[in-house]
Image (cartoon, grey):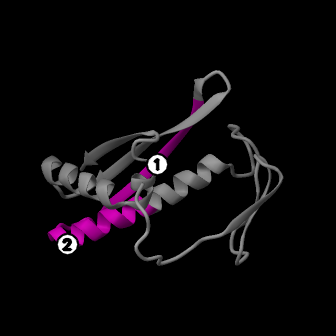
Amino acid sequence: MDTLAKTFYTASATSTGDGRSGHVRSSDGVLDLDLLPPAEHSTHTNPEQLFAAGYSACFHSALKGNAKRLGLDVTDSAVTADVSLGQIEENRFGLAVTLHIELGGLSQEDADRLAEAAHQGCPYSNATRGNIEVTLDVQVG
């Protein structure tokens, strides 16, 4: 297990109520949401959406940082994280993630190289590596 040599930031949030049908609030109050289990027409968020938002933003940041380091222009870029919740076996559940990486103006080879570099450096990718299936879907346009 890797340990942090230096901590840059610690986020803190508390869940109350009934877990997936409860409430989450960050220590600074910026995040303050009711939760409901995943449903197609829900008016509330769920843990998988929160994870997808965090992973997509973190990966996009790693992508942009690596692009700058490599001298690649990724002004026209987006990352969408599809987080799937499912059953692994009886009474065990898990997640799988597909990261849809859209990069305009790059060759497929440069885009693939950039996405893989981001995948190696992104904290979410490092946290999930070896624990859940993460698929990179790199599209150029």
- Looking at the image, residue 55 lies above or below residue 25: above
Q: Residue at the spot x=42%, y=61% of the render? A: 123
Q: What span is colored magenta in the figure?
A: 58-86
In this picture, residue 48 sits left or right of residue 27: left
- Quarter of the figure with residue 85: top right
Q: Residue at the spot x=27%, y=53% of the render? A: 115
Image coordinates of residue 17 in percent, x first then y, are 86, 53
Q: Secondary structure beneath disc 2?
A: helix
Q: Which residue is tagged 1?
A: 81
In this picture, residue 94 sits left or right of residue 30: left
- Quarter of the figure with residue 74: bottom left
Q: Nearer the viewer, residue 52 or 10?
A: 10
Q: Residue at the spot x=24%, y=57% of the render? A: 117
Question: Closer to the camera: disc 1 or disc 2?
Answer: 2
- Quarter of the figure with residue 87: top right
Of callouts 1 and 2, the N-terminal one = 2
In this picture, residue 38 sits left or right of residue 84: right
Image coordinates of residue 77 in percent, x first then y, are 32, 60
Q: Label for residue 69?
A: 2
Image coordinates of residue 99 in percent, x first then y, are 40, 46
| Total marks in image | 2
For disc 1, the neighbor class at 10 Å (few under 14, some 14 to 19, many from 20) is many
For disc 2, the neighbor class at 10 Å (few under 14, some 14 to 19, many from 20) is few
Q: Label for residue 89?
A: none
Image coordinates of residue 129 in percent, x first then y, are 40, 46
- Looking at the image, residue 70 lies above or below residue 40: below
- Residue type pointed to by label 1: Ala
Q: Residue at the spot x=42%, y=54% of the render? A: 1
- Residue type pointed to by label 2: Arg
